[in-house]
Image (cartoon, grey):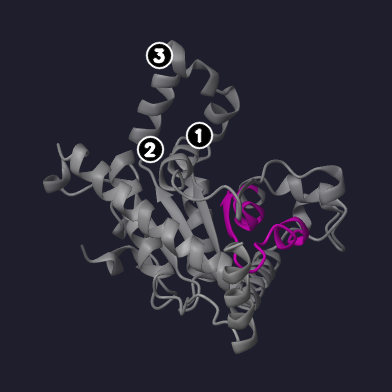
Amino acid sequence: MALEQFRFDGKGKFDMKGFTTTPPDNFKNKKDQIKADIENNIKTLSKVQQHLAAQKQYSVLIIFQGMDAAGKDSMIEHVMSGVNPQGTSVVSFKVPTELELDHDFLWRIHKAFPAGGELTVFNRSQYEEVLVDRVHPELLLKENLPGIDSVQDVSDSLWAERFNDIKALEAYARRNGILILKFFLHLSKAEQKNRFLKRIEVPEKNWKFSLADIKERRYWDDYQKAYQEAIQNTATKANPWFIIPSDDKWYSRLIVSQIINQEVTALPLKYPEISDAQKQQLEHAVEALKD
């Protein structure tokens, strides 16, 4: 499968409508094969993780963004199921706390970046500050930003500055060995409706339902515009966005797992070489164990 079709690296104009939300017809009724392929991809990622942990020179940050019910939680559950919990973390960015609001908008993000050799997953991310805040600019008033005393003070220049700040942070991370993989789970409005109805109609899914999600659905077009501009203004060759068709969860999981494998296996990973002195220590250890 040509994975380049899902990549946007900032060249040209990004058109969300040019990216489908549905899988191709030939992937229908192939759930068993898709599961098997995902399982193989997980095994590959697990091996790469061992190299990451041993070398401690590179790390991986995987970012999932998407509308409510796009499948972020289940994506993390299935695609990351085979990795070693040690050296792996999942960070969910919810409504900022008072402490977080007292700092700059990237403070809580930067301190959650993975250390060398680690793999970190962001469930939502720094992009909430140019998505939710963009749709609901009144939230910015809680951040005590200089010159922002009312919603009327919020201008396009603020969003442009935030896009630049995000790109600068991601470029800095990349220069320091952090591979950033940004996934937008592209869901149709009709499929979101179906998933919300399941949360209401299926008792086992009732716990997932939130009236807040229904409220936010009213802003669907505003969010689509916000995503359009965020992706357009933060995609670069070094840190592109991947637009994942997400109306079918298993298909989206397959594509994400394949992209992750393609990108992480391209890293120059290897087990550290030991010195002659260290080799001698190993030989002495072998001799000592013979007693």
Residue 171, horizontal then vertical, whole percent: 60, 77
Tell me: 162 left or right of 209. right
The residue that disc 1 covers is: 217
Q: Residue 150 placed where, x, y %?
A: 82, 51
| Residue at 28% across, 65% down | 3
Residue 266 can be seen in this image: yes
Magenta extent: 105-132
Residue under numbered circle 2: 189
State how far apart marks 3 and 2 are (Cα): 20 Å
The verdict on residue 115 being magenta is yes
Please give the label number shown on residue 170.
none
* Foreground pick, 84 / 36: 84
In the rendered structure, which amino acid carries the disc numbered 3? Answer: Val
Which residue is under mark 3? 202
Q: Nearer the viewer, mark 3 or mark 2?
A: 3
In front of the other: 221 or 198: 198
